Structure formats: C-alpha cells, structure tokens
Amino acid sequence: MSKIVVTGYGIRAPGTENIECFRSNLMRGICCLDTVTNLTYKNETTIVGLIEDFGIDDSSHKEYRRLPRTALLGIAAGKEAITYARLHHVKNKRIGVFFGISLGNTGSQEFQAAITHSNENKYRKIPITFGHLSNTHSITASISYFLGGNDVTKTITTGCTSSLEAVQDARIYLKSGLIDIAIVGGVDSPISKAASFVFSKTNVLPLNQSLEEGAIPFQSTSKGFAMSEGAGVIILEREEDAQKRGVNIIGEIEDVVSNNDGQPIYSQDTSGDQLLKALRVVVKNRRPDYVNSQALGIQVNDLIEKRASYELFQHEVPFTSIKSMIGNPFGAVGIMQVISSLLSIEYGFIPPTIRTNQKGFEEMKIVRNLIVQQVNSVAITNHGYGGNNAAAYIKRR
C-alpha cells in the first residue's frame, strides 16, 4: 500500500501569519490569546484568539470581495501550502479538496446581522448570499475554486475533530486511487456573543480568569477554553508521486482513526473509553516521541488525556498542547495539531504547554519548556462536541 505523505503546509492563526511565524511561536512559547469583555452577558472577561491580518487583501481580486472571512482564511492558508508543495504547474492530476468545518461563518458580522434582521422581519435587509453564509460546504466550495480543486470537494463537520477527519477521508481517496493530490484543511471563525453565551451556560469558558489562570491545558484551576479562529492546510500525495515530482516530503500520515462516544445529544462520555480506543489503534503498542494533545483547559476533557497517559504509556511519554498558545479554533484545530507535529519532525523540537503549573496533573510528563531533540513520531488526540474522537500517528519519512 502506498504511503501518504505531506508535501506542503500553510496556516493562519492568532498571532500567526505563516508557517515560519507558527514555528517561531511554537518554539518560543508565545501566547497569542487576549482577554475581552464584549462577548459576555455581564461584561465578564473571557479569553479568545483573534486574527487581525490573514494575508489576503479582499480588494486584490474582485471575487474575493463577496467571500466570507472563513473562505478568505482558508484560501490564504491554502495558497501558502500550494506554494510550498510546488503545485502551481501540476497538470493532468485529479485534485481533491477536503475541509473540516464546525461552526463556520456563525461568528461573522454578516451572519449575525442576518439573524437580527430576520427576527425584526426586515425582509429587504437579508442578503441574497445568506444561504451560502449558513452552509458550511459553500465555504469549502469557494476555497476549492480558488485553490484549483478539479475533482471531489468534501466538507467534514464533526465538531473539533472535523479537520483531522478530513485528513482521514483524504487518505482513503488517495490510497484507493480516486484522486492524485489532496488539499486538506480546516477553518472556523465562530467567535460571537451567541457562541460565548452558549458555552458560558455550559460552564466551559474561563470567565473572569486572566491569562495566568484560564484556558490552560493540564491545570485543574482552569475553568474552560479559549474560543479561537483560524485555518490550516496540508498537501497530501502518494509517496511515489511526490518522489516523481521531486518535491520535499515533510512527513508521513501513517494512520488516522475516528469514532463516536455513542452518547445521546447533550451528553458526553466522561470516561474517555472511545478516545483511548482510537489512540490505542494508531499507536499500536509503540511509544511516540510525544503526544500532541487535545487538552484545552476543560477539566473533563483534560482528565481523559491524563488517563491515556497512564494506561497507554505509564506516564513515560511527554504530552503537550498547543492550545495554550492559540486557543481552540474548533474545526481547524486538528489540522493545526498536524502542522505543529510536522514542524516538530522537520525542525527537531517539542513545543511547550505554556502557562500551566500542572496542578492536578503532576504525574504526567507535561512539556512545560521547549525540548530540542530529534522527533521521529507524534501521536495526536482530538475530541469534539457531538462526541466524535480522532487520533493520528505522524512519522518522519
């Protein structure tokens, strides 16, 4: 069976304008989050990750002007990945596009305004484009058009696991020979009062906590996670095809496994059995150099990581979480974990979980400071609303 390898990557995240900036932030342990008071019911502070400049001027192309923020983010990250993989002059190849999206455009001003206008019965104020603003696949279709997708275009929407499961689907298409190249990514821009109110009611936001207190993985005093936005894209190919093109191979996506908790709506499997099951399958009794964890500052989720650390690795394998730096960009977070793991392999380092004091997680081997070493393999864990779990294993080629 063909190995599926990565030949390009691109990213737009809070405080992160490109891949080189992302690598620098990861290695230096830069917190790209901020506290705000304009999203909560009683003007409490909460912690978010916002993008100020994502590298595309929407006036530079007349068709960009009508695109939502999510599409522009995905295009910006995708163009960087395509340049890295030298895809601009590829001809006669079937190019599939696979994007993971969770809440999509719900955080955009246009979406929120349309909801307000409809509630006020202002028919003429509703934009004709609202059907696409509310449809996550329209985001992927727009990104695919501008990035040169010419075959299958798919949107995977399984909560925060969406983009990691997009990688899973793309691998299947490549291995079966249905496509030759896969542009795989994730994007979300969900930050809004509506989202903040909902997550506040479920007690998973760090209200009135400072950056020293909240949205911190592996810390029992953290009250919740940081809502964030962003986009990441990787280019996947069969190894033999990448070799024929003579492009740099960054790493191999050896396996991705996903499943569901099997719980009814509004419920969650707090045991973590299903996430452990997925991780056990991809690890195959091996010990990766570290685990790129989904821990995000919500205690029930982070304790599942603690259980995985003990039951699979006897607390001997390092765990880290990049969410302490960039927050949780929902459907885009899985692909960002993949990209950070690939950077680890390419440049030889394990990024730290910044800001944590490790209270409540003392037994674990948490990476709190940058470790410079050769990295040959990384395991990734991911969990999302709706009960989906995903795990991946990434290797040096």
Image: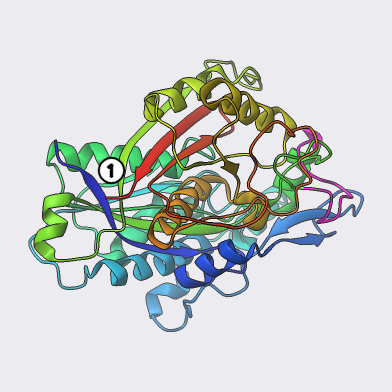
Label 1: which residue? 170
Majority secondary structure in the magenta region: loop
Q: Position of residue 360 (x, y in %)?
A: 78, 32
Tell me the residue at 57%/46% (across/down): 330
Magenta segment: 201-214
Q: Position of residue 285 (x, y in %)?
A: 40, 24
Tell me the residue at 32%/50% (across/down): 396
- Say whether residue 57 is visible: yes
Give residue 6's quadrant in the image: bottom left
Q: Position of residue 25 (x, y in %)?
A: 59, 66
Along the horizontal axis of the image, is 260 left or right of 271? left
Along the horizontal axis of the image, is 163 left or right of 40? left
> What is the total number of numbered labels drawn onto the structure image?
1
Q: Residues within 10 Å of mark 1 (few under 14, many from 20)?
A: many
Along the horizontal axis of the image, is 302 left or right of 373? right
Q: Nearer the viewer, residue 324 or 133?
A: 324
Identify residue type, mark 1. Ala
Tell me the residue at 75%/51% (across/down): 193
- Say whether residue 18 is visible: no
Along the horizontal axis of the image, is 388 left or right of 304? left
**For residue 103, above or below residue 202:** below
Q: Position of residue 78 (x, y in %)?
A: 37, 64
